[in-house]
Image (cartoon, rainbow, N blue to C red):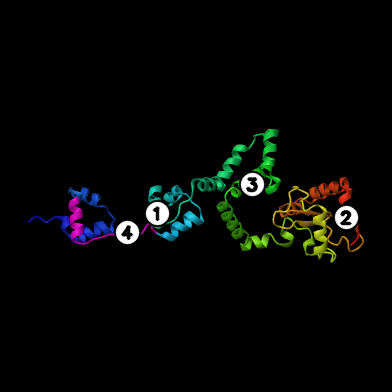
Amino acid sequence: MVYKLYQDEAWLNEQYIDLDKSIREIANELVVHPMTIRRWIAKYHIAKIQPVPLYHDKRWLEMQYADRQLSLREMGELCGVCPDAILKWLKKFGIPRRSSADGCRIAVNKPEMRLKRSLVKIGSHLSEVTKQKLRVKNRTHWDNPLYKESMKIKFKLVNSDPKLRELHSQQMKLEWTKPQRKDVFRGETHPMWKGGVSFEPYCPKFNKELKEEIRNQYHRICQKCYEPENGRKLDVHHINFDKQAGCYGKPWNLIPLHQKCHMWTNQHRFESFHLFMNHYATNPEINLNNDF
């Protein structure tokens, strides 16, 4: 019987494990078919210890994909595999994928992309029309007319369906009960802060009887939207925002409003003051210029 080198377990172990040669390399060296080498390796139970790829670890995938917000391509480059391999293991571990919009947003806001955009803009000059559009776009919240318009459309859609209105209400309650919201929108940090005037007491003469008299004086009609009471008593609003008027000889400047119209006055104090004071001046017969 002819002795063949690949039948030696020690030699085969040295070539395959110690020298880290592949089956094809050993076969080419001995001029045999690779399946012959594979068969003898299996016979002697010789096996390499394969390191576990990084993308087989769920915690690593979550850290790179969710925390560091890397893309599938970037994670594949780190592991030396294609993006499809990363996607396969994301699905296997049940890690939710980002939407296309979120992926684009993350890609655009990366530092290298920002630097690239800034380099492209060097030396460029914007027209006055473009500058004005950017000024409007960069305004925040209610100072931005585009934001106002989008919120009007959103409120109109939400109010058209009771189920959507209820869902929106629950979402807003959850949002405004978050600790970070409470810390930011509280006291002096609130954008509507007026020096703590809401904690000032009302004049004791501003009681239920006086409120009813004001409502009846205006025939129980809101003086902003001119709609009658709709099951809830009208609020009585201090036009000049003076809670102590009437207690120190100053005339009352009171007017009945619906709750939503009353909330509008707190957000638009300057406009509401001039609107209702003009209303008083043009309607002297309803001006309660008395001391109570």
* Nearer-N-terminus badge (2/1): 1
What residue is pinned by disc 4? 50
What residue is pinned by disc 1? 91
Instruction: Tell me the distance, in whole angstroms, between the alpha carbons under discs 4 and 1.
Output: 23 Å
Which secondary structure, mark 1? helix
Disc 4 crowd rating (10 Å Cα; few below 14, some 14-19, many 20+) is: few
Which secondary structure, mark 4? loop
| Residue type at tag 1 | Lys
| Residue type at tag 3 | Met
**Which of the pair 168/131 is nearer the observer?**
168
* Nearer-N-terminus badge (3/2): 3
Viewer-nearest of discs 1 and 3: 3
Where is residue 231? Give x, y as percent: 69, 56
Splitting the image into 4 quarters, where does residue 259 fall? Answer: bottom right
Which secondary structure, mark 2? loop
Disc 1 crowd rating (10 Å Cα; few below 14, some 14-19, many 20+) is: few
Where is residue 166? Give x, y as percent: 58, 55
Instruction: Tell me the distance, in whole angstroms, between the alpha carbons under discs 4 and 2.
Output: 91 Å
What residue is pinned by disc 2? 288
Image disc number at residue 151: 3
Instruction: Tell me the distance, in whole angstroms, between the alpha carbons under discs 1 and 3.
Output: 37 Å
